[in-house]
């Protein structure tokens, strides 16, 4: 018999079917969750990751651990995908997402062993998820200004050490307060906050500049390096004399024509400069080039000029100075002119930098300092996360209690919700409830408290004083999380459970996996039946 192409292909693979595939997937998920479990919460430990070429990363961030782990397994990829998608959507909650996924998978396996079909589990999980989303709506609170600071501190506590945390929280809050977010905060945020890494100084010198800082110096070194309270024009294009087009060359019959052309072009330049002088401009920013002839004319007229700016940089400058980005100086209007409060140049670690401080909010430069590139990257990443969370809060400003409070509440609520459903779905809803408790359990564990006692006492306390009672991880007591300032944006946890349910359900739907023989991780057949 001639073998079909398909069965030939299957020769090279090993097929894991049904329960074995699921068991294998769940083992992978547990292994992954084990790798990030000890990083959860402010008392979580850092992980030191060493890559093949000896590069070392020290991190307390779940998603960084997983991204660097390079695990080649379909389920691992799914989980890493879920945590990355959590990171993109909410900028936080990645470790939580992984832990919940792993718990949900393990609890599903127990149900499957009892004979519950994956389809029923999937249905039960969806019911449970919807109930959680309702409960979150019900118990989340409206954000106020004090909350914002607490949230940024809570977010940063999972990522950096406490000294750095205070500095970054301060900066991120300052940055967030300075930005007025528009509807499409994601894109505009990129334009408005410039990140600039500087090689001198330590992380603690990282600062926010209410304007543009850029690795450039003025075009004419003989012009002033500093100025205050001036008027600025931003030109989109070049500040140049007109060029003679190459194919007009053959038309030139007498030398006078060339001279004429140069004179006219210089006249035009002078008209432009006169326009700038009339508007009392002392600072000109040009997106493209400035010709030599123009440079000396500008300097003689007391105008300091800079050239070759990126679009993002001139847009930021336009926001903080109020200057409109103009295309043609000869048509310049008074309303196109902006104002700046200070301009200065400095040399930092052999590079030349210019700073232009604006007169308006809406844009800034974060000058990131740190003793090594890795440290600077870490600061930039953390700052981005903090600012990302702050900016997402302006889209959705509901908040939830941290310290395991919301999870303990949801678990309790789900258990009574489960009673309203049929036997098998009820089991799945209970399994969902138990999976959420992984958060308070691991927070307690990482802080040296007994996880079972912690959940029991939190649950009892919540029955008396409501769902905002959570764990004080420093002394083990139960506290009102709003009073303790342990707060999280509601969208972070909401995203975690949506992401987790989706990932788990897609694993439950797979009952057949093909493995390429080249990278088989042979499942541990012996222990899987226990
Ligand atoms: P994730 O990657 O899931 O964000 P983190 O390491 O940042 O993981 O830990 C987040 C968890 O730590 C949340 O459940 C949060 O409520 C909790 N947490 C953060 N700060 C505190 C605190 N001061 N007290 C109690 N719990 C805290
Ligand atoms: Mg976090």
Image (tube, rainbow, N blue to C red):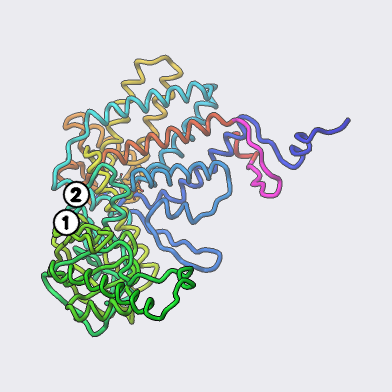
Binning the other alpha carbons within 10 Å of mark 2 as few (below 14), some (14 to 19) or many (20 upward) gives some
Going 38% across and 76% down the picture, which residue do you hit?
257
Q: Are marks 2 and 1 in contact (CB under 8 Å)?
A: yes
* Residue situated in front as seen by the camera: 358 or 207: 358
- In the rendered image, residue 494, in percent from the top left (x then y), is placed at 32, 36
Whether the magenta-drawn stretch holds residue 245 is answered as no
Whether the magenta-drawn stretch holds residue 523 is answered as yes
Residue assigned mark 1: 361
Quadrant that contains the C terminus: top right
- In the rendered image, residue 319, in percent from the top left (x then y), is placed at 21, 57
- Above or below — where is 45 with respect to 53? above
Q: Tell me how far mark 2 sits from mark 1, CA to CA.
A: 8 Å
Going 30% across and 37% down the picture, which residue do you hit?
455
Q: Is residue 451 visible in this depiction of the protein?
A: yes
Task: Confirm if mark 2 falls within 8 A of ligand 2.
Answer: no
Position of 295 with respect to 322 (left or right) is right
Residue assigned mark 2: 180
* Residue situated in front as seen by the camera: 80 or 295: 295
Which span is picked out in magenta?
511-524
> Mark number for residue 429?
none
- In the rendered image, residue 398, in percent from the top left (x then y), is placed at 22, 37
* Residue situated in front as seen by the camera: 437 or 493: 493
Q: Is residue 341 visible in this depiction of the protein?
A: no
Q: Look at the numbered disc 1 and give the secondary structure of its residue.
A: loop
Position of 122 with respect to 177 (left or right) is right
């Amino acid at each position: 018999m001639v073998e079909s192409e398909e069965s030939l292909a299957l020769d090279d693979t090993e097929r894991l079917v049904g329960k074995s595939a699921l068991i294998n997937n769940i083992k992978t998920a547990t292994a992954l969750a084990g790798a990030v479990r000890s990083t959860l919460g402010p008392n979580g430990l850092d992980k030191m990751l060493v890559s093949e070429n000896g590069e070392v990363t020290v991190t307390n961030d779940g998603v960084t651990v997983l991204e660097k782990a390079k695990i080649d397994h379909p389920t691992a990829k799914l989980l890493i995908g879920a945590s990355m998608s959590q990171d993109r959507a909410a900028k936080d909650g990645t470790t939580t997402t992984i832990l919940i996924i792993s718990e949900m998978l393990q609890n599903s396996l127990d149900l499957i062993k009892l004979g519950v079909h994956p389809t029923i589990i999937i249905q039960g999980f969806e019911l449970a998820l919807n109930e959680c989303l309702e409960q979150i709506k019900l118990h989340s609170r409206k954000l106020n200004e004090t909350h914002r600071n607490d949230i940024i501190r809570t977010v940063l506590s999972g990522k950096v050490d406490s000294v750095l945390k205070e500095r970054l929280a301060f900066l991120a809050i300052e940055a967030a307060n300075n930005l007025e977010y528009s509807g499409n905060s994601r894109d505009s945020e990129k334009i408005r906050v410039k990140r600039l890494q500087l090689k001198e100084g330590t992380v603690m010198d990282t600062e926010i500049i209410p304007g543009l800082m850029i690795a450039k110096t003025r075009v004419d070194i003989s012009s002033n390096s500093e100025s205050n309270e001036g008027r600025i024009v931003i030109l989109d294009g070049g500040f140049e004399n007109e060029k003679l087009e190459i194919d007009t060359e053959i038309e030139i019959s007498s030398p006078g024509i060339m001279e004429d052309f140069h004179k006219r072009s210089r006249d035009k330049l002078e008209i432009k400069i006169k326009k700038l002088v009339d508007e009392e401009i002392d600072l000109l920013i040009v997106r493209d080039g400035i010709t030599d002839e123009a440079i000396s004319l500008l300097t003689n007229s007391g105008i300091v000029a800079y050239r070759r700016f990126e679009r993002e940089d001139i847009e930021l400058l336009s926001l903080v100075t109020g200057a409109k980005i103009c295309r043609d100086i000869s048509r310049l209007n008074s309303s196109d002119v902006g104002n700046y409060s200070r301009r200065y140049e400095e040399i930092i670690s052999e590079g030349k930098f210019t700073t232009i401080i604006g007169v308006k909010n809406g844009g800034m430069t974060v000058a990131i300092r740190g003793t090594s590139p890795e440290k600077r990257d870490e600061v930039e990443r953390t700052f981005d996360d903090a600012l990302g969370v702050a900016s997402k809060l302006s889209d959705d400003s509901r908040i939830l209690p941290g310290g395991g409070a919301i999870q303990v509440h949801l678990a309790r609520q789900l258990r009574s919700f489960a009673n309203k459903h049929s036997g098998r779905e009820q089991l799945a809803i209970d399994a969902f409830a138990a999976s959420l408790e992984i958060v308070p359990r691991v927070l307690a564990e990482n802080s040296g408290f007994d996880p079972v006692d912690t959940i029991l006492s939190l649950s009892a306390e919540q029955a008396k004083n409501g769902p905002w009672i959570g764990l004080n991880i420093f002394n083990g007591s139960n506290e009102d999380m709003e009073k303790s300032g342990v707060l999280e944006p509601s969208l972070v946890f909401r995203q975690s459970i949506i992401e987790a349910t989706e990932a788990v359900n897609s694993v439950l739907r797979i009952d057949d996996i093909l493995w390429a023989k080249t990278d088989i991780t042979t499942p541990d057949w012996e222990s899987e039946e226990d």
